[in-house]
Amino acid sequence: MKTFSLHHFPLENKTILLRVDYNVPLEEIKKTFSSPSYLHKALQKRKVLDNRRIRETLPTIEFLLEKKCKVIIAAHLGRPEGKIVEEFKVAPLGRELRKLLPKVKITDVHDCIGEEVKNTISYGKQGEIFFLENLRFYKEEEENNPIFAHALSDLADVYVNEAFSNSHRKHAS
């Protein structure tokens, strides 16, 4: 019986939406800061405590980069319930990925849908990674909203699922 393999799919020079499960533990931050700007900086500098889930996606990412793909990484972190929550921003995940792929240009995109996101990706080059902001900042993600799903799919030529632990969820991504 033949099985589907990413290795047999024509991916050269495509833009890939790669759904990953990077819902990893981050270091705790004591929220005793005197100003919101200090808290913001502390949250953005948090460290990933266990990067196993990120490391497990590296073979797929490296394969896509070898095929000269633009790779758009879509992830979630925590349960922000459809609101932008500072402690669930994905900047620490992008920073950890940069440590693991130091020779690859990785651009943090500060949203996950919209014209600005599309423009940022379109101006990028093949072989680059674009790390979208937390999908769950939109309630439409967990509501399995077809318009949100279309907005995500409009970013890329091909969807690749590396978030198998989330595959049972009825979410838009």
Image (cartoon, rainbow, N blue to C red):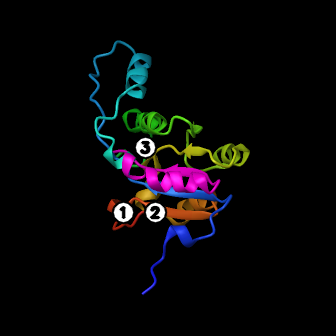
Magenta segment boundaries in residue numbering: 55-78
Q: Are the two marked residues, 1 and 2, in contact with CB atoms closer than 8 angstroms?
A: yes
Q: Please give the residue where the numbered disc 3 appears in the rendered image.
A: 83
| Residue 34: percent from left, percent from top | 35, 12
At a point 27% along the width and 29% down the height, the residue shown is 28
Tell me, yes or no, if residue 22 can be seen here. Answer: no
Q: Earlier in the sequence, mark 3 or mark 2?
A: 3
Is 148 situated left or right of 156 in this image? left
Residue 63, compared with residue 28, is above or below; it is below
Residue closer to the observer: 8 or 73 = 8
Q: Residue furthest top?
A: 34
| Residue 155: percent from left, percent from top | 63, 56
Tell me, yes or no, if residue 161 can be seen here. Answer: yes
User: Given this view, does label 1 or label 3 mark the residue nearer the observer?
Assistant: 1
| Residue 97: percent from left, percent from top | 45, 39
At a point 46% along the width and 84% down the height, the residue shown is 2
Q: Please give the residue where the numbered disc 2 appears in the rendered image.
A: 161
Q: CA distance from mark 3 to mark 2?
A: 24 Å
Q: Is residue 72 magenta?
A: yes
Is 171 situated left or right of 120 in this image? left
